Image (tube, rainbow, N blue to C red):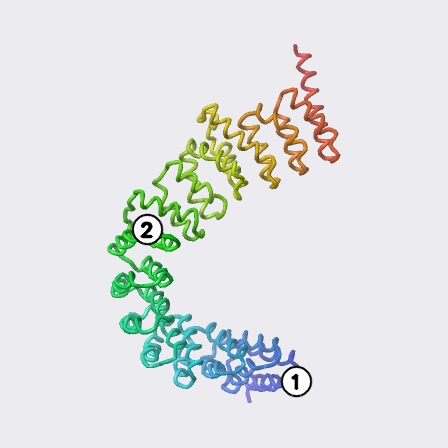
Amino acid sequence: MSQVENFLEQQLELLKSEDPTTRSSAAEALMSEELSENAVEALCMLVTDHDKGVRNSADLTLSINSSSIIPKYLVKYVSSDDISVRNLAGEILLKIGANAVEAMLDYLDKGNDDDKKFIIDILGLIGEPVASDKINDIFKVNKNDNVILACIEALGNLKSEESVDFMIHIYPKNELYRPTIIESLGKIGSKRAVQFITERFQYEDELTKFSMIESLGLIGDEETFFFLLSELSNTEGPLVWVILNSIYQLKEKYNFDIPFDDKMKKAILDTIYEADSEFQKAAAYLIIPFDDEEVINAVLTIYGNNFELDDIIKPKFIGRPLVTFNTLPALLNKIPENLRSLLELLKEMIVFENIDCKGILSPLQLRNLTEAISRCLDDPDEEARKLAAELLFILDENVALLFLDKMIDDDNMWNRLKLIELLDGTRSAEADFALQKLANDPEEMISERAQYVISQRESSKYETKIEN
């Protein structure tokens, strides 16, 4: 017996140990070894071990070892009555991937319907086209709904064009299959699939239409694009969101032109106000050519909720600063959930984008904006209060000084510290008085900083007198 064979025999004996730690160590010791059939069979049996650590070691070794016969011995465990054993065997087969496909295809004729469904699910996830023929055969003769649904989903993942005709054939026979068939046809993407979906669309319920529209966004063509545009006139609610998303996908794919009419604008605004961020992104891209106050107001209401979405819509604010500045007061007065984000946007536009807010706005417009910002000094969000104070000093120092008492009484220490910084650049009796009050602040850091600023100001005044 060779040294390698002797090592294998030793580990096989250790796999039978009553100590789970020993079994685990023995399993892991075989991770990179060339395994005999006996060793593979013994390792596969460990997926049934009562000890979780041993099962984890078996999982690791069986997933990593390159032995081509592991799937042959492992696949039978998908028939286990113990769901944890069944799932572990399935997970390992999925990790092995393409090299496990042949063994699973062979086992399809041996297992019951539950086993067939389980294996077909894994084959669909692995995505090896070689599995299509066998799954198609089962699809056409099996009567179990769960197996049929697994076949439909797997054949979609495998992009099996050979399955399209039979999917269309069984579509009217059972409502249970319809959403999954539509989803799979969308993945397969054949011309026949597109035609079938558009022809059936008007006859289906809302849930099925939802799947149909999503599929058309993936596989549609120019004719589909205009079909979806026409459906906007006849549709309301969440279906509008999905239609817009698919229209956007086709626009990007084929560089189609979007009609910028009231119907499109309304659909986009409805989506921005009501939809999830996934659909809001598509609507935000589509709304770029619209620049009126109604549109700016809509995108301001969702600003700050999603980083990707913010990147799409921020250029619209920067490109139309007057409309943005005029729209903000009404929104800020409503104390929206994204108040802090709106204040951050305003600061970014003025400070970092160097947009001359005071030069753009009339005195009345500027007053409306500063009044709205001043109300934010009462907001529960300490960061929003700090931003509001900073913006008031930037936009109109005289207005900011009117609210010094409120800023001094802010219960957040860092906000009061920021106020000292703002007052340091302000020369007025009101600022001097406020600094004196802050010099008596109970927080030592605040009082010391205020006293330092006061001393610097007094020193500066003294030097000015000497020079004069």
Q: Position of residue 38 (x, y in %)?
A: 52, 87
C-alpha separation, residue under disc 2 versus residue under disc 1: 62 Å
Q: Please tell me the numbered disc located at residue 42.
A: none
Position of residue 440 relative to residue 108, above or below, is: above
Position of residue 77 relative to residue 420, above or below, is: below
Q: Residue at x 43, y 84 (%)?
A: 112
Residue type beneath disc 2: Glu
Q: Residue at x 42, y 77 (%)?
A: 117
Residue type beneath disc 1: Glu
Of badges 2 and 1, the one in the foreground is 2
Q: Is residue 425 left or right of residue 213?
A: right
Q: Quadrant of residue 219?
A: bottom left
Q: Position of residue 56 (x, y in %)?
A: 58, 74
Q: Is residue 377 left or right of residue 124?
A: right
Q: Please tell me the numbered disc located at residue 18.
A: 1
Label 1 element class: loop
Q: Position of residue 249 (x, y in %)?
A: 34, 53
Q: Quadrant of residue 134?
A: bottom left
Q: Position of residue 431 (x, y in %)?
A: 65, 24
Residue occupied by mark 2: 252
Quadrant where the C terminus sits is top right
Label 2 element class: helix
Question: Which of the two labelled residues, at mark 2 and mark 1, occupies the earlier sequence position?
Answer: 1
